[in-house]
Amino acid sequence: MRVSRRRFVEGSALLILGKISGAAAHELDHPHIERLKARRAQLIAECERLDRMWHEGQAKMPWHLLPGPKFRNEQGGVCGHRVGWPADLSGRIKLKAGFVLVRPSPLDLRELFEQDALERGRETAVINYQERVRQLRDRLRLKRQCETEVGMPRTSDWESLDIEIEAIDVRLELLLERPSEPLKTT
């Protein structure tokens, strides 16, 4: 099971909140603790709402725009590691090993350019490279458009929430380390 950064932060904060609500709670009679806990709970709820929106949006996306295996073998089965690039449905990028490159990245396209330059000449390689990059841009544009249409949140939507959660965790940890000192509010 892969643990996301956000889930790790949530789990470590539970340890902090457990310390506060446990034996040390009677020693920490600070008025900000409950407000910090309440704000943190609001932020976590907002993160969970965004998570739900993201999963619902993923379910509505066409398969070729979702992350998937990078290659297709000679029998037509998919193989290779999972990547986030949209699939090239044309099946035209055949590799020497017998695989078809289904989800090319910009680096893959650059490597294909260098291979084409050696085998077919620079002029042909440039034409092929420009066309492949144009197709990748079109697929990425379609992916972004579809994500917007299905209501998927952007990764940046979580960023300010994660930052504020981390700041609250630090403030709570400081309260645990120095319970007799007053909390500085900003």
Image (cartoon, rainbow, N blue to C red):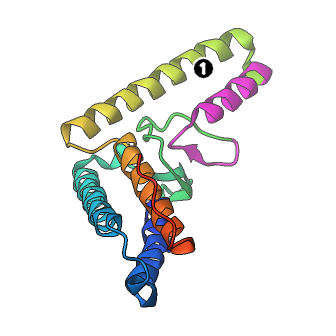
Toward the viewer: 75 or 134? 134
In the visual, does 107 lie left or right of 10? Answer: right
Residue in the picture at 37% in, 76% down: 29
Question: Which residue corresponds to mark 1?
Answer: 129
Q: Quadrant of residue 31?
A: bottom left
Q: Quadrant of residue 122?
A: top right
Q: Quadrant of residue 147?
A: top left
* Residue sticking out furthest to the top: 123
For the C terminus, the quadrant is top left
Residue in the picture at 38% in, 86% down: 26
Residue 39: percent from left, percent from top:
28, 60
* Amino acid type shown at disc 1: Tyr
The relative height of residue 87 versus residue 5 in the rendered view (above or below) is above
Residue 184: percent from left, percent from top:
46, 54
Residue in the picture at 67% in, 27% down: 110
- What is the span of residues highlighted in magenta in the rendered image? 96-118
The relative height of residue 124 versus residue 92 in the rendered view (above or below) is above
In the visual, does 29 lie left or right of 183? Answer: left
Residue 86: percent from left, percent from top:
43, 40
In the visual, does 185 lie left or right of 37? Answer: right
In magenta segment, residue 151? no
Q: Secondary structure at mark 1?
A: helix
Toward the viewer: 128 or 36? 36
